[in-house]
Each structure stands twice: as C-alpha cells, then as structure tokens.
Image: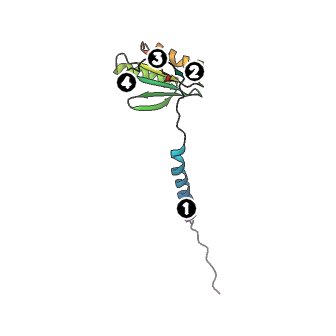
C-alpha cells in the first residue's frame, strides 16, 4: 500500500467562491441603499431661487454637505469655510442657499449661517419646499 504525501498548498477555490457571492450581494444591495436627502420644510410663498447658487445641506444628524457645480461632498465646518473661501475667489458674490432638514437642530443651521456670514457672503438664504 502506498503512503499518502501531504501537500503544502492552500486551496483558494472556496475563498474565490465566497468573494464572488459577496460581490453579487453588494452589487444588488448598493442601489437600494438610501442616499442622504434633506427633507425641507415647506412654506406657502417662497422667493425665486438664484441662478447657480452654492448649497450647504444640513442633515437631520447635523452632517454637512457642500454642493456646487462640481457635485456634492460631505464636509465638516473647517472644510466648509475653506470651500466657501475658494468659491468666493472664483465668483465675486455668489448666492449661498442653506438647506436645513426639518429634523435638524436649529443650532446646527445657525452655526452654518454664522460660518457663511463670517466669510463675507451677503447673498445668503434658506432653502424651502413649496406646499
């Protein structure tokens, strides 16, 4: 009878199978993930939105998002101040809209407004939805 020899190799086929299953799961689940949207308060009469405004979104959890022509990006207060300064260097007096979620803390929205005003912006408004 022949003796068996031990192999010192790792069989990676089960690992590849698991990785492919995980890849399929994430590919199916990714489109279903909820994106961070802001639920704006609504009013009867709202003024017209200026052309190409800069937007700062304050989420329900207080997270900040800066939106301009290049897209949206999550920021903190220091990054927001730097982005506002850079935007003001490109456009002399841009309009800035602050979109605060209904569930956002009042203090978080006021801190954003204070940051914007401290950078010298004069055209600042609160974004609302129409009823």
In this rendering, the label closer to the viewer, 1 or 4: 4
| Residue 103 within the magenta-colored segment of the rendering | no
Q: Nearer the viewer, residue 89 or 101?
A: 101
Residue at which label 2 appears: 108
Residue at image x 55%, y 25%? 101
Query: What residue is shown at x 40% (from left), y 22% (from top)?
Result: 53
- Tell me the quadrant of the picture where the N terminus can be found: bottom right
For this rendering, which residue is in front, 64 or 104? 104
Q: Position of residue 121 (x, y in %)?
A: 42, 14
For marks 4 and 3, the one nearer the N-term is 4
Q: Which residues are magenta?
A: 1-14
Query: Is residue 9 highlighted in magenta?
Result: yes
Query: Circle 4 is placed at which residue position?
Result: 52
Image x and y of residue 82, in percent? 44, 22
The residue lying toward the viewer, choosing from 123 and 80, is: 123
Q: CA distance from mark 4 to mark 3?
A: 13 Å
Residue identified by numbered label 3: 125
Report which residue position mark 1 lands on: 17
Mark 2 or mark 4, which is nearer to you?
4
Q: What SS does tag 3 mark?
A: strand
Q: Position of residue 10 (x, y in %)?
A: 57, 65
- Among numbered discs 3 and 2, the one appearing first in the sequence: 2
Residues at marks 2 and 4 touching, judged by CB atoms closer than 8 Å: no
Gap in Å between the C-alphas at discs 2 and 4?
Answer: 24 Å
Query: Label 1 crowding class (10 Å Cα cut-off): few <14, some 14-19, many 20+?
Result: few
User: Residue at image x 38%, y 31%?
Assistant: 70
The residues tagged by marks 2 and 1 sit, at their Cα atoms, a distance apart of 47 Å
């Amino acid at each position: 009878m022949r003796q068996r020899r031990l192999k010192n190799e790792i069989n990676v086929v089960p690992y590849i199978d698991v990785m492919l299953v995980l890849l399929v799961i994430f590919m199916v689940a990714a489109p279903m993930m909820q994106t961070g949207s802001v639920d704006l308060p609504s009013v009867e009469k709202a003024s017209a939105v200026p052309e190409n405004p800069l937007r700062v979104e304050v989420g329900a959890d207080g997270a900040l998002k800066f939106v301009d022509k290049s897209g949206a990006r999550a920021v903190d207060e220091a990054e927001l101040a730097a982005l506002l300064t850079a935007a003001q260097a490109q456009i002399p007096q841009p309009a800035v809209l602050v979109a605060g979620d209904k569930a956002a803390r009042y203090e978080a929205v006021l801190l954003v407004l204070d940051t914007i005003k401290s950078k010298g912006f004069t055209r600042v408004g609160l974004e609302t939805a129409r009823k």
